[in-house]
């Protein structure tokens, strides 16, 4: 709201003139421009004088119900309008019954604006004092920039300490787990919790236990199962092995033994060989139903040229190529070289096999010859040249 203008000074009363140009006081009205003493005084403005006279006349004759219109200030000599000064505006009249006139309590309608402004300022100061007192009673929360920055720094420090604490706890827990798993006795291998299965007839279970027990007391995560497997595979008669952990402190060793395919004379007894020619076991007597290869194993070992080993391998290839029903009838396999393998069946029939080539074709030709009526019962079957087989003699009937 725009504050009211200050009251104007009272208008200069009109000066009465006599016949001789002398005022009421008897002094002659002189032109200040001609008076040396009043050389510096500004000339009177006829318009201003008339306006002041009109204001005075209007104030005295104004009706309480008719507001006075304030005349517009005169334009300056330069043509640029300026706002009237407070001294030029003069007193302001307000009709009786308006807000300001009622507040002031005048009966003439003229308001003392200076007094009204002073009262308004005093009221504002009083309200401000009460507001300040009320504000002082409430708790003050600082939202300044420095306080906010300090709070952010404190929050960052708390977060950093929290992250550091989480990392420390996590690393400590991880270190504890590593120590328990890899260095403590909590998960140490217990020999009583080792299970060995599948050793069969020709694998020594005690040797397997001895190999596995070498890792006793070692934490289970550190047990080298691969090394244990290699050691067990090196044992006689073991064809394959699987070693697995049984938590928390055990092992499971599953052994696949080798299967003997033939018996070879060796040092007063027999060495049992599998289909690959690997020694499975040593026995005093050859098991019943197991073919015997009439090739001393000692000669195979001592022969530097390797001919005995090749002969042995050819005999084993022939045995493995035969059907199971025919292989069960084989009693002896003899060979002077790798190309003249001879097989003797349980009824005395001799099969001249020749070398280890075309074994599948030779097996098929042999089965056809033995099933044909005209060749059944022959004493010798020569399939060394399978496309030109030969049968010789007749097998003598058995006595029983």
Image (spheres, helix red, strand yellow):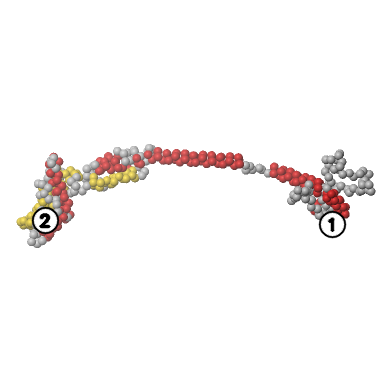
Nearer-the-camera pick, 192 or 280: 280
Disc sitting over residue 65 in the figure = 1
**Whether residue 347 is visible:** no
Q: Nearer the viewer, mark 1 or mark 2?
A: 1
Q: Position of residue 101 (x, y in %)?
A: 82, 52
Q: Kindly identify the residue that appears in the image at 92 percent across and 48 percent down.
A: 17
Q: Is residue 32 shown left or right of residue 75?
A: right
Q: Kindly identify the residue that appears in the image at 22 percent across and 47 percent down.
A: 258
**Whether residue 14 is visible:** yes
Disc sitting over residue 181 in the figure = none
Which residue of the protein is positioned furthest toward the left in this rendering? Answer: 393
Q: Is residue 8 shown left or right of residue 174?
A: right
Q: Kindly identify the residue that appears in the image at 40 percent across and 38 percent down.
A: 179
Task: Mark 1 or mark 2: name the one nearer the start of the chain.
Answer: 1
The C terminus appears in which quarter of the rendering? bottom left
Location of residue 373 by image quarter: bottom left
Q: Position of residue 58 (x, y in %)?
A: 86, 53
Q: Secondary structure at mark 1?
A: loop
Nearer-the-camera pick, 90 or 21: 21
Q: Secondary structure at mark 2?
A: loop
Q: Position of residue 333 (x, y in %)?
A: 12, 49
Q: Is residue 50 shown left or right of residue 248?
A: right
Nearer-the-camera pick, 22 or 341: 22
C-alpha separation, residue under disc 1 versus residue under disc 2: 152 Å
Q: Kindly identify the residue that appears in the image at 41 percent across and 40 percent down.
A: 177
Which residue has dot 2 on it?
386
Q: Are marks 1 and 2 in contact (CB under 8 Å)?
A: no
Total marks shown come to 2
Which residue of the protein is positioned furthest toward the bottom in this rendering? Answer: 373
Nearer-the-camera pick, 391 or 360: 360
Q: Residues within 10 Å of mark 2 (few under 14, many from 20)?
A: some
Q: Residues within 10 Å of mark 1 (few under 14, many from 20)?
A: few
């Amino acid at each position: 709201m725009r504050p009211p203008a200050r009251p104007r000074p009272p208008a200069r009363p009109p000066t009465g003139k006599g016949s001789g140009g002398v005022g009421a006081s008897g002094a002659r009205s002189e032109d200040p421009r001609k008076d040396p003493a009043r050389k510096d005084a500004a000339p009177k403005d006829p318009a201003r004088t008339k306006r002041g006279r009109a204001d005075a006349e209007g104030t005295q004759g104004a009706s309480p119900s008719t507001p006075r219109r304030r005349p517009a200030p005169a334009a300056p000599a330069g043509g640029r309008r300026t706002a009237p000064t407070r001294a030029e505006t003069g007193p302001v009249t307000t009709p009786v019954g308006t807000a300001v006139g009622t507040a002031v309590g005048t009966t003439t309608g003229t308001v003392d604006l200076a007094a009204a402004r002073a009262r308004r300022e005093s009221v504002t100061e009083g309200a401000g004092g009460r507001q300040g007192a009320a504000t002082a009673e409430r708790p003050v929360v600082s939202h300044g920039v420095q306080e906010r920055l300090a709070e952010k720094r404190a929050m960052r420090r708390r977060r950093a300490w929290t992250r550091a604490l989480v990392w420390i706890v996590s690393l400590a827990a991880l270190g504890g787990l590593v120590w328990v798993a890899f260095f403590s006795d909590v998960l140490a291998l217990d020999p009583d919790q080792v299970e060995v299965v599948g050793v069969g007839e020709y694998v020594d279970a005690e040797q397997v236990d001895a190999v596995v027990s070498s890792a006793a007391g070692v934490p289970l995560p550190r047990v080298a199962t691969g090394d244990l497997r290699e050691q067990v595979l090196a044992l006689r008669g073991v064809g394959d092995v699987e070693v697995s952990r049984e938590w928390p402190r055990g092992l499971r060793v599953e052994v696949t033994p080798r299967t003997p395919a033939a018996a070879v004379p060796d040092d007063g007894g027999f060495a049992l060989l599998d289909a690959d020619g690997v020694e499975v076991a040593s026995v005093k007597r050859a098991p019943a139903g197991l073919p015997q290869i009439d090739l001393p194993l000692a000669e195979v070992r001592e022969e530097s040229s390797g001919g005995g080993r090749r002969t042995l391998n050819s005999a084993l290839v022939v045995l493995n190529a035969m059907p199971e029903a025919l292989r069960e009838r084989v009693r002896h396999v003899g060979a002077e070289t790798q190309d003249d393998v001879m097989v003797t069946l349980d009824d005395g029939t001799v099969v001249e096999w020749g070398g280890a080539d075309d074994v599948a074709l030779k097996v098929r030709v042999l089965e056809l010859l033995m099933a044909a009526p005209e060749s059944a019962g022959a004493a010798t079957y020569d399939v060394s040249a399978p496309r030109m087989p030969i049968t010789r003699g007749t097998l003598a009937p058995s006595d029983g």
